Amino acid sequence: MQSITKNRQSPEVLRTMIERAYGAAQVPTGDGWVTELGHGWFNVAYRIRLRDGAEIVLKIAPPPAVEVMTYEQGAMAIELTTLDLLSTRTAVPVPAVDFADQSRELCDADYFFMPYVDADNLGIIAETLPTAERDALMEQLGVLNREINSVPGQHFGPLAGPGHATWRKAFTTMIENVLVDGERRGVDIGWEYDTVRAVVAAHADSLDEVTEPRLVEWDLWDSNVMVRDGKIVCVIDHERAFYGDPLIEAGFTGTQMAAFGDAAPFMHGYGHDELTDTEQTRRRLYCLYLLLIMVIETVYRGHSDPQQYDWARPRLDEAMALLGRTRQ
């Protein structure tokens, strides 16, 4: 995936980063020791073979000169915090952090190294799997996602704060930040921005039902799940986590919008019954939030291929309709 947020570095710079993390004896020589992993959408990631043959992954944050959306600011620090929370407070399989550097001395952004996970990306292979096997993996994901959500927070909103005392304030701030991002860059979302604000305000009382902040991944799609021999062996990419309502997790999206797939296996694994009316309203607000990001981020990422925008724009109309607003 091509994006202007991907902070690619020369082999010479990569070698200096490897030396700092693993020592001079591990710096690779010759050719063929580095490959860019192209599936991600935000950070650049490299698969690297060290001199002793060990395989590792290097993730580098976007260049500081590239404007990102408000909720993406400090994303790598969020990921490192989330990895620490999950590795110390849950049994969810996540990558170890071999080395992290936020000094900006060797390159212009934060970066960290982790071991390479020798497994298949579920998002890539899902369509090739028998339905029963795919559903079983989504059930496993539901189990793991519930464990992630078991970690409590002291506030709603960003992991590092500043936080909010209520989920209504945290979520309405999140969605307002996305709308302001879109307005700042003049993104055509197909609706007047104030119309979207009015729809959110009309349904915001549904958010008051959420009173306990929980760690949520939000971006835990199948493309962030690594599998081997029918089991989930690692969950990757934790840079969008925050404290909020577990119902905002990606696995629940299909309960309201068929375009995001069947949510039943995930919900079975999670142990969540059919959504109540209030839960459905909240989940529809979360669908709206997701689709706004999917439309607006195409401008921030500098996408030259309109595929994502063209897919997400009609889905945004669907999300608005679910909340009672259709075109006149």
Image (spheres, helix red, strand yellow):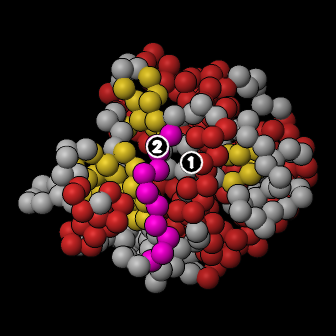
- Quadrant housing the C terminus: bottom right
Observer able to see residue 69: yes
Q: CA distance from mark 1 to mark 2?
A: 8 Å
Give the image location of residue 253, x and y in percent: 63, 40
Whether label 1 touches label 2, CB < 8 Å: yes
- Quadrant housing the N terminus: bottom left
**Residue shown at 37%/26% (left/top)?**
228
Q: Nearer the viewer, residue 128 or 92?
A: 92
Can you identify the residue that label 2 sits on? 95
Q: Nearer the viewer, residue 3 or 7?
A: 7
Can you identify the residue that label 1 sits on? 83
Query: In this image, 48 relative to 93: left or right?
Result: left
What type is the residue that disc 2 sits on? Pro
Query: In this image, 220 relative to 27: left or right?
Result: right
| Mark 2, other Cα within 10 Å: few <14 / some 14–19 / many ≥20 | many
Residue 204 occupies quadrant: bottom right
Taking 193 as reference, is 118 above or below it?
Answer: above
In the rendered structure, does residue 97 fall within the stretch colored magenta? yes
In the rendered structure, does residue 135 fall within the stretch colored magenta? no
Give the image location of residue 3, x and y in percent: 38, 67
**Residue shown at 59%/31% (left/top)?**
91
| Mark 1, other Cα within 10 Å: few <14 / some 14–19 / many ≥20 | many
Mark 2 lies on a secondary structure that is loop
Q: Which mark sits nearer the N-terminus, 1 or 2?
A: 1
| Residue stretch rendered in magenta on the structure | 94-104
Observer able to see residue 1: no
Give the image location of residue 2, x and y in percent: 33, 64
Q: Nearer the viewer, residue 147 or 181?
A: 147
Taking 114 as reference, is 141 above or below it?
Answer: above
